[in-house]
Image: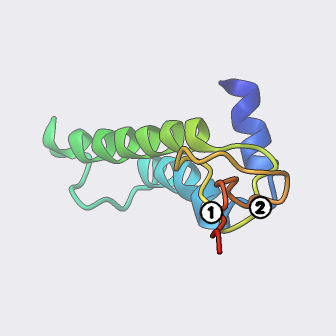
Amino acid sequence: MGTRFFHYVRDPQVATWRKLAGLLAVLYFVSPVDAIPDFIPVVGWLDDLGVLSAAAFFMVREVQRWRPGTPAGVPSFDGLPRDEEGRTREPTLRRHS
């Protein structure tokens, strides 16, 4: 998973906001400005934990769905077989005259 994550981050076809989701969660965690201040015991730490957990879940799901070499804008997780250009390989129907 670790090397796959680094390849995911380096892929130019992955949207920048998707790559930054985890980083922004860590910045929120270390930031002194929070939705609920950290000096409030337990509750102040739960919002940080919630943001980190949501970002970690999002990043793991994104990296698992990511397929290297898939053209931008083409979902790689729809289950359809695709050729090298990303077009679906569905059989064509021929009409008999």
Q: Which of the marked residues, 1 or 2, is nearer the chain's N terminus?
A: 2
Seen at 54% across and 45% down, the residue is: 62
What residue is pinned by disc 2? 71
How far is the residue under mark 1 from the one under mark 2? Answer: 26 Å
Amino acid on which disc 1 is placed = Leu
Seen at 42% across and 47% down, the residue is: 29
Instruction: Indicate which disc residue 28 carries.
Output: none
Question: What's the coloring here?
Answer: rainbow
List x then y, in percent, for residue 86: 75, 58
- Choose mark 1 or mark 2, whichever is in front: 1
Amino acid on which disc 2 is placed = Pro
Is the residue under label 2 in contact with that under label 1 (CB below 8 Å)?
no
List x then y, in percent, for residue 30: 47, 47
Element assignment for label 2: loop
Seen at 44% across and 54% down, the residue is: 28
What residue is pinned by disc 1? 93
* 29 with respect to 41 (left or right): right
